[in-house]
Amino acid sequence: MENSAGRRLNTLIRHLLLQDKGSVQVLHPNGLSGERLKHAKSDPVIIGGMVLDIHAYPSIPAIPRTTTPGKVHYVVGGVARNVAECMSKLGTKPFMISAIGPDMAGNLLLEHWESVGLCTEGILKGQGIETPVVCNVFDVNGELAAAVASVEAIEKFLAKEWIHQFTSNIRSAPILMVDANLSLRSLEASCQTAQSGTPVWFEPVSVAKSKRVASIIEYVTFTSPNEDELIAMANAVSSEDLFSPIQRVDNDGSTQSIESFFLLLKPAIWVLLEKGVKLVVVTLGSDGVFLCSKGGAEFTTVDLKNTEPSHFGKQLSEMVTLNCRNQFVNTEKFNKSSSHLSVVHFPALPASVMRLTGAGDCLVGGTLASLSAGLNMMQSMAVGIATAKAAVETRKNVPSEFCLATIADDARRVYSSARVVFDQSVV
C-alpha cells in the first residue's frame, strides 16, 4: 500500500495532469511514463473489466410480467477485477488496469478497491464513462435465470492509449492476464506490449467474447475456457466452424464419463495447443478441470520471472508444497514429443454452494497467485480449485478472506485425486 507521502504526491500529479479529451476527463500518470518504477518491480498485471453486479434473488418462483418478492444485493465484480482481488487475498498484489465512471457504481468499486489496499493508479476514472453494470436475476435454486450487461465502457475507454501508459508495469510483470471484455485493439496492444517471454493468460469471459482470442493467439500461454468457450475459440482460430457444441448429458439422460467427455473435447483442445497455447485449462464446473498440454512439460516447469512472494504468499507456497509433494501423477513419464497430448483431470471438491458466479474467476486467481508464489502448475491448479470451492460458499464474488490452512488442505485433497486421462500421440 502506498505511504501517505506517496498518496499525496500521486493525488497532486493527477490533478496537475488532468486533461479534457472531449467529454472524458482522463487522469494521466506522470510524465516519466516508461521510467516509472514504483509498481514495475514484479507485480502481475491484470487488464480488464471492473463491474458492479446487481444480484436479484426471488424468495418464490418468479411470476412473469409482475414484481416478485426477494432480495437485491450489490456485489463488486468483473472478471479481471475478481481475479485481481482473489490474488491479493492470497498474498499477491497485482497491478490492475481498467476504466470506471464517476457514478455510484464506480465509486463503490473504487472504494472497495482502496479498502483492500490495492493500487488505483491504473484505473481510469473520468466524466463521460458509465461504469459497467451487470444485473443478474437468479431462480429460487440459486441458478442464473437471466442477466443484462451494460459493459460498453470497457471496450470504449479501456483503450490502447491508456494501456500504453503502463508499459513499464506490463513489461516487468511476471505474468499478464487479459480478459475478453477488451476490444480487439486493446487485446492486441496489451499482448504486444509485454516483453517476449512474459506469459499471457487469456480469460474468455463468454462464448461470444472468447472468439476474440483469434487476434492474439500467438501471444497466449494459458487460457481457461469452459467447454462451450473452448469450442468457440477453436472455431475462431481455425477461421471456420469445424466444431459443434458438445453436450455432457446424452439424449437418454445419462451423463458421459470424464474420459468419454474429454475425447469429445480433444480435437478442439488440440487446435489451441497447435496454435501455440502452452496450457489449456478446461473448466468443467462441478466436474473439475482438464489441464492439457503438449507432452506435459509445462505441468511442472512454469517459471515466472521477477516473482517476489509476500509473507502470506510464502506461507501459502510452503504449506501447499508440504501437502502436495507426493507425485500422484508422475509427470516424468509423459512423452515430451510435440505430437503428444497430455491431460490431467483435477476433480472439484464437495461444497455447500451458496452461489456459483465468481467461482471460475477465483479458480484463475488462485492459480495465478500460486504460480506467483513459486508453485508449479500442478500445485497451482489444485490451489485454484480449492479457492473456487471457497468462492461458491459465499454470496460474494470473492470471499472476504481465505483461511490458509483450509486452502492448503483442500489443495492437498484435489492434488491427491488428480489423474491422467490421456497421454498419447494425436498424429
Image (tube, helix red, strand yellow):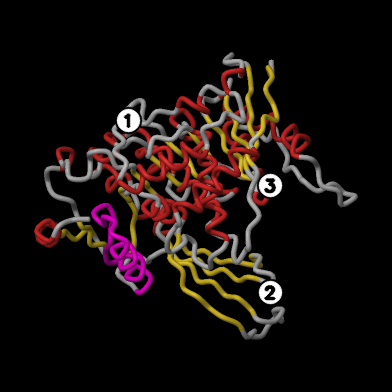
**Is residue 184 depicted above or below 18 in this figure?**
above
Which disc number belongs to residue 60?
A: none
Q: Name the residue nearer the viewer: 157 or 22.
A: 157
Image quadrant occupied by the N terminus: bottom left
| Residue 155 in view in this figure | no
Q: Name the residue nearer the viewer: 326 or 117.
A: 326
SS state under label 3: helix
Q: Position of residue 56 (x, y in %)?
A: 57, 75
| Residue 51 in view in this figure | yes
**Is residue 302 depicted above or below 74 in this figure?**
above
Residue, disc 3? 287
Task: Name the mark nearer the viewer: 2 or 3.
Answer: 3
Residue, disc 1? 305
Residue drawn at x 30%, y 45% is 310
Q: CA distance from mark 1 to mark 3?
A: 32 Å
Q: CA distance from mark 2 to mark 3?
A: 23 Å
Q: Is residue 281 left or right of residue 405?
A: right
Residue, disc 2? 140
Amino acid type of the residue tagged 1 in the rendering: Lys
Q: Is residue 409 left or right of residue 130?
A: right
Amino acid type of the residue tagged 3 in the rendering: Asp
Q: Name the residue nearer the viewer: 405 or 235.
A: 405
Q: Name the residue nearer the viewer: 365 or 403.
A: 403
Amino acid type of the residue tagged 2 in the rendering: Val
Q: Is residue 63 magenta?
A: no
